[in-house]
Every structure is written in C-alpha cells, then in structure tokens.
Image: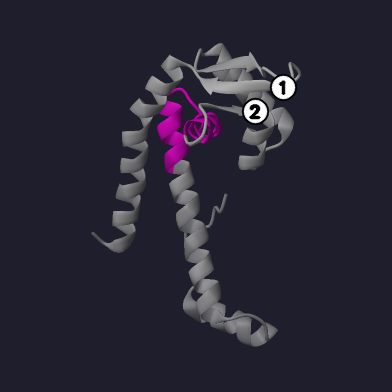
Amino acid sequence: MFFLKDLPTRQMIEGYVTTLEAGDEDAIETALIMMRDASVLVRRIDQYFQAENLSQLRFLIMIVIDREPERPWLYQGEVAERLDVSKPVLTRAVQSLMDAGLLTVSPDEDDKRWKRLSLSPDGTKRLHALLPGYFQLISDFMADRKGG
C-alpha cells in the first residue's frame, strides 16, 4: 500500500532531483500519482469484497480458474503460478473457498497426488454476480481520474 495522501509538490521533487543529482522529475511525479491512485483503488476493491464477505485473493483465485480457456479446472500449482502469493496463503484461501462451497477439489485422473480445483456451480454463480460490481467500481474509478 501507498499511504501518502498529499504528494510532494513539483517544486519539492525538482529540489530533490537537483540536490541529489538523480532521477527525472516527470517520471517521479507520474510514478507517485500512479502509486497513490493504485493504492486508493485497491482499498476500494478490498471494501467491495469485504461487503460481499470475500477477499480480493479469493476472488482472484476464482477468476483465474474461470478464465482458463481450455478446461474448467486448474491444478493448485497452476493457480499459484498465476498469483503473487505464498503457498501457505494460497492453501488457506483455497480451503476457505472450499469450506464456503465455492470451489471443488478432485484428484487428477492420471496422478492421484495432483488435485484439480474447479469452481462449484455456486462458485460460478457467485463470481458472475460479483463481476458487474467489480467492473463498475473500476470503471467509475477510472472515469473519476479522467475527469468525467
């Protein structure tokens, strides 16, 4: 998270860059704005999912499985490759989705040690119910940034 509400002024940035003889004022200012905006958006998304009794991570697990074009399941290792979380964190999130009836786990047909993760019918229904609000939140955020 980026917690700085009031960004340094352009004059401050220019002063630091000049004094330190390092950096590009435009790039620094743009990056600071991007970091603040991204942090605000992430907080809004977190609030959206909290109101839906879900977390962003659990949503992302569901969307990663749902977007698979070739098959309706992924191995847990494949989910891990697509997300930037540790294996223990992923394991807990997967378990919570299973406990909530949103994910199912089945053994691989060829190697029983591998587990396939799939959205349950309730998981698919829940994901598709969440998507309109999620996309609207992002669209509204971006419209605010464009001034319209």
x, y percent for residue 84: 64, 43
Coloration mode: one colour
Viewer-nearest residue: 45 or 110 = 110
Q: CA distance from mark 2 to mark 1?
A: 7 Å
- In the rendered image, the quadrant that contains the C terminus is bottom left
Q: Is residue 134 left or right of residue 38?
A: left
Q: Is residue 92 left or right of residue 25?
A: right
Amino acid type, label 2: Tyr
Residue beneath disc 1: 114
Q: Quadrant of residue 73?
A: top right
x, y percent for residue 104: 56, 15
x, y percent for residue 98: 57, 15
Tags 2 and 1 touching, CB below 8 Å: yes
**Residues rendered magenta in the picture:** 44-66
- Magenta: main secondary structure equals helix
Q: Is residue 83 left or right of residue 62?
A: right
Residue at (50, 29) in percent of width and height? 62
Viewer-nearest residue: 148 or 16 = 148
Residue beneath disc 2: 75
> Is residue 24 among what the camera can see?
yes
